[in-house]
């Protein structure tokens, strides 16, 4: 496979694994603070990020490329509160969107249409992820990021399930 694209895909695997690591750290924070729904939502999010990394891992191997796993950056572990935490998730996802877009641009430049087509799924996934987090942030701002409002939203976050499309 195209070596520049292979290298960039490997870097994206690292970014997805870091995302998983970060959300796992956030989930642990939520657990300690007693936000059970937030803990659950983030734990599933961490699992979902792992499936993103694995999709890329399998794609590289399927194309006869090499997987090159590098060191994963340490994840932060302190947040002011649930609202601030979800705002960090949103900022992080915006960064991931940028990375995916850059990766797609590289595929166009390198005329690697197969990888470009593969990345379409990730482009759509990023739209969905940013929208989901925006909804949570809006709800927290509306209902209140503490007290009964937070309690209610935390409860709603506990019903999230991993969808087949993202576990595939
Ligand atoms: Fe794998 Fe949240 O992007």
Image (cartoon, grey):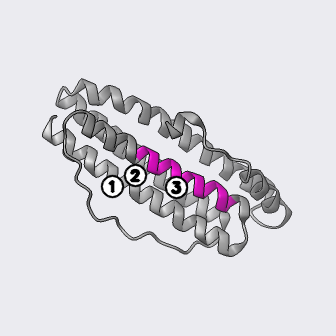
Q: Are marks 3 and 1 in contact (CB under 8 Å)?
A: no
Count of marks overlaid on the render: 3
Quadrant including the N terminus: top left
The percent coordinates of residue 91 (x first, y second) are 49, 55
Residue under label 1: 14
Which of the labelled discs sits on residue 16, or is there none? 2
Q: In the image, which residues are magenta?
A: 38-52
Q: Are marks 2 and 1 in contact (CB under 8 Å)?
A: yes
**Residue reaching furthest right?**
148
Q: Of residues 70 and 119, which is closer to you in this image?
A: 70
Residue 94 falls left or right of residue 149: left
Dot 1: what SS? helix
Residue under label 3: 46
Quadrant in the rendering for residue 34: bottom right
Give the alpha-carbon distance from disc 3 to disc 1, as whole Å: 14 Å
The percent coordinates of residue 157 (x first, y second) are 72, 52
Which of the labelled discs sits on residue 112, or is there none? none
């Amino acid at each position: 496979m195209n070596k520049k694209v292979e290298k960039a895909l490997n870097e994206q695997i690292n970014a997805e694994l870091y995302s998983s690591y970060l959300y796992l750290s956030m989930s642990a924070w939520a657990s300690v603070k007693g936000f059970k729904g937030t803990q659950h939502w983030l734990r599933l999010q961490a699992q979902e990020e792992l499936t993103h990394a694995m999709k890329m891992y399998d794609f590289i191997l399927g194309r006869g490329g090499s997987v090159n796993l590098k060191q994963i950056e340490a994840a932060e572990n302190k947040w002011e509160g649930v609202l601030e935490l979800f705002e960090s998730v949103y900022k992080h996802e915006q960064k991931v969107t940028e990375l995916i877009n850059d990766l797609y641009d590289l595929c166009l430049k390198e005329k690697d249409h197969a990888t470009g087509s593969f990345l379409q799924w990730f482009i759509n996934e990023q739209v969905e992820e940013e929208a989901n987090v925006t909804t949570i942030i809006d709800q927290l701002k509306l209902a209140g990021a503490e007290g009964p409002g937070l309690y209610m939203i935390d409860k709603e976050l506990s019903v999230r399930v991993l969808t087949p499309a993202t576990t595939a």
